[in-house]
Image: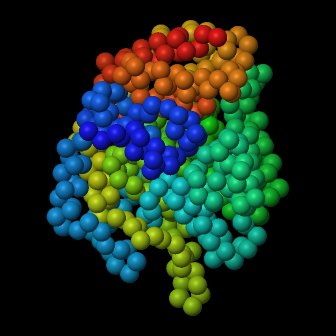
Amino acid sequence: MRDWVNLDKNYIWHPFTQMKDWLESDNLIIERGDGVYLFDTNGNRYLDGISSLWVNIHGHRKRAIDEAIINQIHKLSHSTLLGLGATPSIELAEKLVKITPDNLSKVFFSDSGSTAVEVALKIAFQYWKNKGCENKKLFVSLDQAYHGDTIGSVSVGAIDTFHSIFHPLLFHTLVIPTPFPYRNPEFTPDELKDNCLDNFRKIASERGSEIAALIVEPCVQGAAGMIVHPKGFLKGLETICRENDILLICDEVATGFGRTGTMFACEHEEVQPDLMCLAKGLTGGYLPLAATLVSNKIFEAFLANHTEYKTFFHGHSYTGNALACAAAIACLDIFDRDQVLERLDPKIKFLRNCLAGRLANLDNVGDIRQCGFMVGIELVQDKISRKPFPAELRIGATVTQNVRKYGVILRPLGDVIVIMPPLSINTAEIDKIVSATHKSIQETCKL
């Protein structure tokens, strides 16, 4: 048997990982998956409590997706979309336009959430340039926003832990406050929402002639620690954008495909963005694929004679890859065939009840934030003072390492424990995740 742990240490540089710690640790190596479970190289079974970083929707080794990929291999694995069309990308684009907000009509494919955002930023910038509005080149984002890791997507991000080192490389953006009641207890959620909207309204009225677009994670800011926005905040942002001729970009990379209880989070407030970014769950967690959808108004600004140079000069070799598109088509078909969304609400309520019954009263749980199947559990030294743990203790990481002995895989965002299981999980498995998390918090947070 090969020594996978040491082979990994010899050759792999892991993302978002301090490799000094990794090289000094005995690490978990995954070999296979089945349903909502992952198995390591020693045969141990774990509930995939984070959907393999928020991407797995219907479970591992889903037969319909497996077969779709195999069938597509027998026909075509890849053909460029530069100068040619390809049937899988056409079929997928048609499906996406039918399930997204009505104003979205064209699909631009890429390969990750970061590139979906990068495409949206470049399209929004060039849209105004093509329209002759040379001054509209600023972007607005929310405090604690996360939109990816490419230079453009980092420029509209605002999480210093991830982004501060790259500030000299980034373009200038405007940042508005995030309505986060837990960190602002002196305000009610509605007061905080209104204050944040007033801030954006002031910026928009003063600098709307310079602002190309607002980009927002609708309803939930994932990497910020599962910050759930007050009801009406997203709709308020849309209204201000419309009043000031600012494009609205909804980054649904994390929130899309059922994660918040609806197919897309913007549906909760009937918001129609000018551009929408999709990735993660698009292929059911099988293959890298992303899409940026735009309104016809946006698309038409790029239609011109070749010599006007209004073409969108962007793309990559694997744009609209046939295998990834086949997986995505099968993933979307499962939503209809298995009535995934219709069956989701009882499981969301069960998860909420489990969290309230098992975790809410723990001394070291300061806040539980949930929107659908997106959950953040914020750990503190004690509930009354809300005093955070010293960073050097890495409590969140320790809790998620410890929970593995109960057969569950979770991942922290600092000292916020994330639970985001596949939509196919059942109530017994939900109960197991919450129970294991309860035990691990109790065992780990005793100072």
Looking at this view, is 294 or 75 the one in front? 75
Colouring of the image: rainbow
Identify the residue at horizontal 77%, vertical 41% (top origin).
Answer: 198
**In the displayed structure image, the side of residue 359 where residue 128 appears, left or right:** right
For residue 301, what is the image quadrant? Answer: bottom right
Q: Is residue 384 above or below residue 348?
A: above
Identify the residue at horizontal 73%, vertical 13% (top origin).
Answer: 385
Looking at this view, is 309 or 386 the one in front? 386
Regarding residue 261, the answer to whether it shows in the image is no
For residue 42, what is the image quadrant? Answer: top left
Residue 74, x across and y down, in percent: 16, 64
Looking at this view, is 339 or 142 the one in front? 142
Q: Which residue is most to the bottom?
A: 307
Looking at this view, is 105 or 137 the one in front? 137
* Placement of the C terminus among the 4 image quadrants: top right
Identify the residue at horizontal 34%, vertical 64% (top origin).
Answer: 321
Residue 303, x across and y down, in percent: 52, 79
* Placement of the N terminus among the 4 image quadrants: top left
Residue 196, x across and y down, in percent: 74, 38
Identify the residue at horizontal 73%, vertical 74% (top origin).
Answer: 134
Residue 237, x across and y down, in percent: 66, 46
Q: Is residue 241 above or below residue 270?
A: below
Regarding residue 437, the answer to whether it shows in the image is yes
Counting the numbered discs, the total is 0
**In the displayed structure image, the side of residue 16 where residue 88 appears, left or right:** left
Q: Is residue 80 above or below residue 221?
A: below
For residue 127, what is the image quadrant? Answer: bottom right
Q: Is residue 204 above or below residue 379?
A: below
